[in-house]
Image (spheres, grey):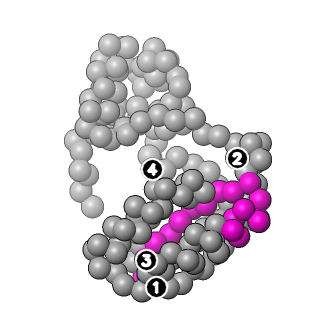
Amino acid sequence: MPLKADLDAIDWKILKELQEDGRMTNVELSRRVGISAPPCLRRVRRLEEAGIIRGYRALLNAPALGMDVVAFCLIGLKHQSEAELKAFAELTRGWPIVRAAWMVSGESDFLLHCVASDLATFQSFVIEALTSTPNVETVRTALTIRKVKDEGLVEIAP
């Protein structure tokens, strides 16, 4: 699959380092990738402007904040017209318990990543929000047991 961006080895190093620690200073980043600070900053800004770096955020420890339930929901819609797909996608944006959502192919239409404080809160969401949503035909849930891998979203080879 061809790359959609023209990146050299230094750009890839920058992306790898920032994905591991987005809070490091530009001076530290430049030291790690082997170039001086000014061109490093120009490269980072170019990657941001190109939309390759979408933003920066803190990764929170959900259980430490009392958010102990992580679950995935597979949603099947009765009708898959473009308007119906867009309408359901828009609904997901308004549900705080849904932390990420994907439109998927196969037996289901959407995959929702949900985080809740407890099982009762998650169950209420499934019953009161998901199953009662017009056009939702099936809801299959999977409660997680424990996270076994947590890497950056994109693999970047060394």
Disc 2 vs disc 4: Cβ atoms closer than 8 Å?
no
Residue 66 % position (x, y): 77, 47
Q: Earlier in the sequence, mark 2 or mark 1?
A: 2
Marks 2 and 4 sit apart, C-alpha to C-alpha, by 22 Å
Say which residue label 3 marks. Answer: 109
Residue 29 in the image: above or below residue 55? above
Give the number of the disc on residue 107.
Answer: 1
Q: Secondary structure at mark 2?
A: loop
Give the number of the disc on residue 50.
Answer: none
In the image, taking residue 61 as reference, residue 58 lies left or right, namely: left
Amino acid type shown at disc 3: Asp
Amino acid type shown at disc 1: Glu
Marks 2 and 1 sit apart, C-alpha to C-alpha, by 30 Å
Say which residue label 4 marks. Answer: 154
Foreground residue among 143 and 121: 121
Mark 2 or mark 4, whichever is nearer to me: 2
